Image (spheres, coloured by chain):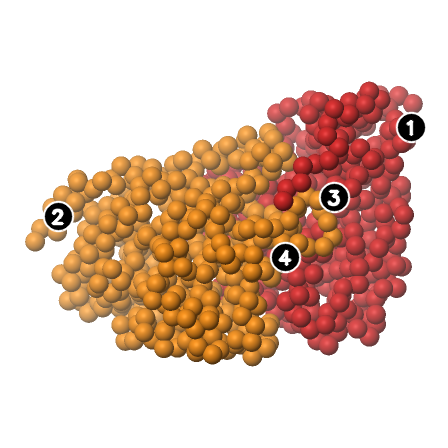
Chain colours: A orange, B red
Amino acid sequence: MDFEAYARELDARDPLAKFRDEFVIDDADTIYLDGNSLGRLPKRTRAILHDALENQWGERLVRGWGESWMDAPARIGGKIARLLGAQPDEVIVADSTSINFFKLVMAALAARPGRKQIVSEIINFPTDSYILQGVARILDDGHSITNVAPQDDGVVPTQTVIDAIDAAHCALVTLTHTSFKSGAIYDMQAITDAAQRAGALVLWDLSHSVGSIPIHLNDCNADLAVGCTYKYLNGGPGAPAFLYVRRDLQAQLQNPIQGWFGQKNQFAMEFEYAPAPGMARFLVGTPPMLSLLAIEGGVDILLEAGIENVRAKSIAQTEYMIALYDAWLKPFGVTLHSPRDANARGSHVSFGHPDGLRIDRALIEDMRVIPDFRPPDNLRCGIAPLYTTFTDIYRAMERMRRVLDEKLYEKYPKARPVVT
Amino acid sequence: MDFEAYARELDARDPLAKFRDEFVIDDADTIYLDGNSLGRLPKRTRAILHDALENQWGERLVRGWGESWMDAPARIGGKIARLLGAQPDEVIVADSTSINFFKLVMAALAARPGRKQIVSEIINFPTDSYILQGVARILDDGHSITNVAPQDDGVVPTQTVIDAIDAAHCALVTLTHTSFKSGAIYDMQAITDAAQRAGALVLWDLSHSVGSIPIHLNDCNADLAVGCTYKYLNGGPGAPAFLYVRRDLQAQLQNPIQGWFGQKNQFAMEFEYAPAPGMARFLVGTPPMLSLLAIEGGVDILLEAGIENVRAKSIAQTEYMIALYDAWLKPFGVTLHSPRDANARGSHVSFGHPDGLRIDRALIEDMRVIPDFRPPDNLRCGIAPLYTTFTDIYRAMERMRRVLDEKLYEKYPKARPVVT
């Protein structure tokens, strides 16, 4: 098979091809495969930030709050809701994913008093595991975390999660929907059903799903979710995160961090806290407005492209990458750390190799390919269909083959320096 | 006295006059007296954001973390430390003031197990009161909050705070150092001493102090502090806040929100949380980098101007404003809601009038003067010596007199529409 001609052909008839021009891509020879960590800068974000700086902050000063800023968390949240299969009034932008996760874990546990089990996973994104450990510590009232473990393929079967739920004691099931290492996708419907049958709430971390795969929070009757805006949403480094609370749960749940942006009738400046109705109660302090406004450009591009179209291209691209893996990398002993079933896989593909860290380094330093590395041995290649071309994938895999074939990674140290 | 000539003379020999040109001031006829709510845009911040957008995010992409972003919270925190009388490794930039306040309140209470009293104040900035109420609710283990009340002049005497501290039970004393309504400054040394003598920790909210008055955290042996960067530091709308933990306390205190940016050796991605040494343990999630980087320009300007110089000008300016008040506003029944003693007053002056809300509205809509209003009757006039001139104050007070004299406020509604 002529892989290169195939890539050219698919690029030529790609209905999303025009969206690549929406992004700043100064150096087309660098193949960026880390949009799953930090997405590219949308050109229209330049205008958004210029307006925020000059016309809003610079000129209107504090009047910007009433004119441009106060409604931004709900407005942008409402747009993100369309990528989540949720209602606009079920999503708001606030704080970081970690902090939103903390807020919803605390709120969920308080809504299930007496139930002490939390079900999560060993392979969760570390910040989620750390937050859960911290919550158990500060509550100090007997909560225990059951962390399900993956099989040899790095994936936790859905049934393993369901079997871990203790119907008498489970308060909360929380998982990262698309796994940050393997890219495996959990069955949201089956796990949500099982958690709710047991009387527990379910909280999905959508950081590696949103903007890359269609999500159906309402259809699955999901309770709670959080997610990140700086990956496939292209919101900018550390852009504020979002949280989702199903409409009927909003009045039942209380934000543990009761700040003034969550206060009913905030500018009355009253002494006693009374939570705002709706999602606003999950806000805390004054939102970092420049970073928050910057999110909207990338979200708009995704809505214009259509998440179903993005998913179709993403599947074709990960399939193509895996075909190249079979042909070129597998002979060098590289393993596939992502599911072969496209329906069970998100928009990144992980490869395993004992020298993964050094291969990552050689690709970045010598080959103008930017994947990322996740310990112990994962080389993650993220595909962002809005700007990644099939030819990008061809060239990246071709360079990866060269790094392996010529052992170009051997000049780099085996271990990352440990920061203590 | 010729107030106008006096203003011209003081402006002419103002050693800080040149710093006004560091800020974007497009419309010099608008008198901005709300720099204590949202500071002006520093011109150099334009270049900082342009660099962050184009050269860092746009071009370097995820490599920006290693090259430009990971050390920004500690680097900018280290600069802010110089405005606080603290060591560079005692301050870090993170999250919002409300969230930092939550983190340190939780950490402080955990460090004083068995002690159940929190001393705070009725006139605290609302978010601090709300957070404390929330902490008492989620801990649900008998913590009670003693809120000291002000005298008729709106100010809480230092001795009232000291008397409220229960030596057997007090865990934490927390106050806003410069009061957001009256501008009254607490005696940090006396209250810190009293709290520590009782075995309690003390947590200062410096939001209305930092960048306007010299602060001596180390000299006072203060335990903990938080503060805001978008007021006198001119960091931009909702810019991330800072927190301070005295060096010897850092290893003793635990962040209740254990996120991955607070993890030791973060990118090892280990499963068990282990707090980073030093202030990094008080970080949580990925910082909103555009908003965070924007802080540095304003902080640098303050360091160049010198906080002692800023304070000297601020005192001269609030004294001048109060002299104009005595001559022009008092005859209309306006009361002074700030201390007359300059040493006990920050950089804003509050005036009281039953029609304060309507006067605020008339000043903004008809007079190109922008103060702000805080219920029930406070018209707050913030002075930012880096860009406020004496002539600005003359003209603002002259326009305020006209609004009162001609009752220009009467066309506006008496109450703000209630948002429910």
Give me the residue at 50% from left, 32% from top: A51
Q: Of the residues under marks 2 and 4, which one precedes in the sequence?
A: 2
Same chain for marks 4 and 3?
Answer: no
**Identity, as a three-letter code, of the amino acid under mark 2:** Tyr
Q: Nearer the viewer, residue A247 or B382?
A: A247
For marks 1 and 4, give the CA distance: 42 Å
Visible residue check, residue B237 = yes
Q: Taking B21 as reference, is A240 left or right? A: left
Q: Are marks 2 and 4 in contact (CB under 8 Å)?
A: no
Give me the residue at 84% from left, 42% from top: B338
User: How many marks do you count on the picture?
Assistant: 4
Q: Are marks 4 and 3 in contact (CB under 8 Å)?
A: no
Q: Nearer the viewer, residue B82 or A288?
A: A288
Same chain for marks 3 and 1?
Answer: yes
Secondary element at image label 4? loop
Q: Taking B31 as reference, is A117 left or right? A: left
Write down the residue under mark 4. A258
Secondary element at image label 1? helix
For marks 3 and 2, give the CA distance: 64 Å
Residue depth check, mark 2 versus mark 1: number of the one nearer the observer: 1
Q: Nearer the viewer, residue A326 or B407?
A: B407
Rendered-image quadrant of the C terminus of chain B: top right
For marks 3 and 1, give the CA distance: 30 Å
